[in-house]
Image (tube, rainbow, N blue to C red):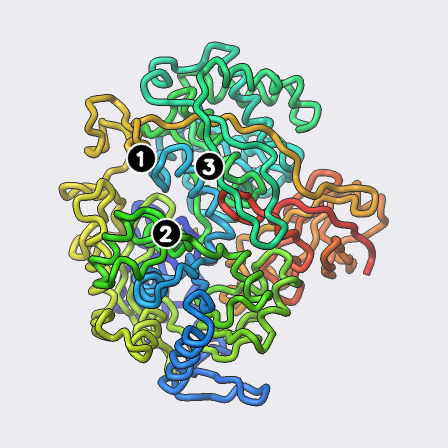
Amino acid sequence: GIPLDANLDWKKGPCRFCGVGCGILVGTENGKAVAVKGDPNSSVNKGLLCVKGYHQIMCLQSKDRLNHALVKKNGKYVKTPIHEALDLVASKMKETIQNHGKDSVAMYTSGQSTIPEGYIASKLMKGAIGTNNLDCNARLCMASAVTGFMTSFGIDEPMGCYEDIDYADYFVTWGNNMAEMHPVLFSRMLEQKATRGAQIIDFATRTTRSSSASDQSILFEPQTDLAVANAICYEIIKNGWVKKSFVEKHCSFNKGLTNIGYGLEDNFSFTDKPEKIDFEAYKDFLKDYSPEAVSKYSKVSVKDIKYLAWIYGNPNNKVVSFWCMGMNQHTRGTWINNLVYNIHLLTGKISQPGNGPFSLTGQPSACGTAREVGTFTHKLPHGVVTNKKDREMAAKIWKVPVEQIPSKPTYHATEMFRAVDRGDIKFIWTQATNPLVSLPKTSRYRPGMQKESCFVVVSDVFPTPTSDVADVILPAAWHIEKGGLYGNSERRTQYWEKMIDGPGETMADAWMFIEVAKRMGYGDLFPYSKENHVEEIYTEYRQFHEGAKHGMAPLDVLKKESGVIWPYVNGKSTQWRFNAKYDPACDNGEDFHFYGKPDGRAVIWQRPFEEAPEKPDQEYPFWLNTGRVVEHWHTGSMTRRIPVLHQAMPNSYVEFHPDDAKKIGIRNGEKIKVTSRRGSCILPASINERGLPTKGQVFVPFFDENMLINDVTLDAFCPISKEPDYKKCAVKVEKA
Ligand code: SF4
């Protein structure tokens, strides 16, 4: 009811939710946030927001907000002064390290943590304590994008920017329901469709809201995107659409190991062994992927495969490929990322306005915090733990002995919770994430978190099924109740200042880490002030990029702008990396320079089609696919507390193709039990509602903590990225 031009104190910041990173303006009055509108100065969203963005601050009115620390005593939570709770956390962490060693403690953070929070988590775990037991929930959504970039380009994050949307003739979305998951970007695409005739091709395993707004919807059998991508390359070569001058100068060819497993067993490890090949060998490999051959098992018609190849191959077409979880949450997630890069590299359609592969993120700072700062087990704020020079740089900036930083990665997300279950990890601290709803095959990991052998600390804004098993619950400040920086999908770093005080004893996560670090005796390493720690930490973090090709903008610039894209060089953002026209780091005199690779060449990978670990059979005849809906943010811990969003989408459901529903004899809304070899979940049927799975497939959104579909999913993962596959497992369905 507050007019958008109301005379409030308006402050700029990023949206709290998805990786699009829309700019918001928050109106405050008498110390309360009372209104939100889109920031017209943000080039991301130009004033527009989606339904989650507009209503975000309403979650702060929820009555069950965590205002005070809670400590479990004799099975009951007791309200405890936060400084006592932090004393307990520090003493437990110290005692565990003394009794069981550094690798008995772990931290599991989030792509929703701010850049300073991720940085301090890394400094505490890797620099002060000396363990690489730090991983984050971006492992569950983005890790395959990272390994895709690293293996193809040797450097992480997309090379283009959202402005690509303004120039492309075609958008090909790979398993990506952007209308619901990246709604503001999808609106920008629809605007280009309406004004310039740009076309949207939706390539997916089910029909969604994105499909209905697209020019063409092409459906494929789960897992066969690998084969279709190879078939597109087959056609590109066959029709002479390879941009030879680009490929000869800027690409090399590799093949990796095959039959690489699915990570289902404990302590699974895998290292790829790339082998150089030449164009002829690559072409020979593709001979099994003719459109005719692939059409038989992908269920994509020969005509549609040829059409996709033409879109990419025709030199007159500008094409942007978009993807997110559909490709990343895949037992061959790294491979399918590589394969889409192959298409863009063969045709030279990369890193130019309107031409490029674009991997999107789901969380607001999956890029900024998880990938750039590096809250993955193998990462450092610059580079990786396995690289001596990177460890030396971290040791110098952190002022710790270099031997203190271990050189081997330890547990990625899934393996971390397996280690909790085995009793190898005896202390775990999770922040801004809800693993007991979001982990695949959650039923396997819940008992470990409930064991006395592991001390569990959860910092969050609201209670969740994860905080329900905690020994200590720490009340976290929401994003506008603290300052911070996020990094979105287009490498845009966005700063915001603290706008309001949080209730009770809520505290910024970064400050909780610092308080615990001080109590553990590491005070000298964390000399920040409570008022300015965000700015002080970011300034320290920027030291990692001094002289590097991917420096971030300084704070004074970020304070003025609605986000700044990195690399920020000589006072300017670099919108298209690796292209000498735009990127000053291209210094080899060529038109393109993939400087992430020692030879300056991007890699075209030979990656075959391999089957999913579990396929429908007689006993479990349906594919299960899981995902999100526009109303809810991930596990719903915030959006389910926003009345208008809860009313719009009060509970999860299981979506059927009408023919399957008819065959089983079920009606819309009827309770259905979805069962896999791991567990079951009861949900109402949804037929002909929002989405339409292909026959033989069901789809379930995962936001609903009362209907835990992740008890049903499989904890198989991509052996290279270690990202789980939430999109494919076998289930049976019956009336409940
Ligand atoms: Fe927020 Fe994403 Fe919606 Fe933009 S599209 S308003 S960033 S949830």
* Quarter of the rendering containing residue 567: top left
- The residue to which callout 1 is attached is 596
- The residue to which callout 3 is attached is 322
Q: Nearer the viewer, residue 57 or 459?
A: 459
At x 65%, y 23%, the residue is 294
Confirm or reject: label 2 Cβ below 8 Å from ligand 1: no
Expressed as whole percent of the image width and height from the top left, the position of residue 160 reads 34, 36
Q: Report the side of 312 relative to 693 (left or right).
A: left
Residue 559 in the image: above or below residue 245: below
At x 25%, y 68%, the residue is 9
Expressed as whole percent of the image width and height from the top left, the position of residue 492 reads 30, 48
Q: Nearer the viewer, residue 193 or 172?
A: 172
Q: CA distance from mark 3 to mark 1?
A: 22 Å
Three-letter code, disc 2: Lys
Three-letter code, disc 3: Phe
Three-letter code, disc 1: Gly
- The residue to which callout 2 is attached is 379
Residue neighbourhood size for the residue with mark 3, other residues' Cα within 10 Å, grouped as few (<14), some (14–19), many (≥20): many
* Quarter of the rendering containing residue 599: top left
Q: Who comes first in sequence, dot 3 or dot 1?
A: 3
Residue 657 in the image: above or below residue 164: below
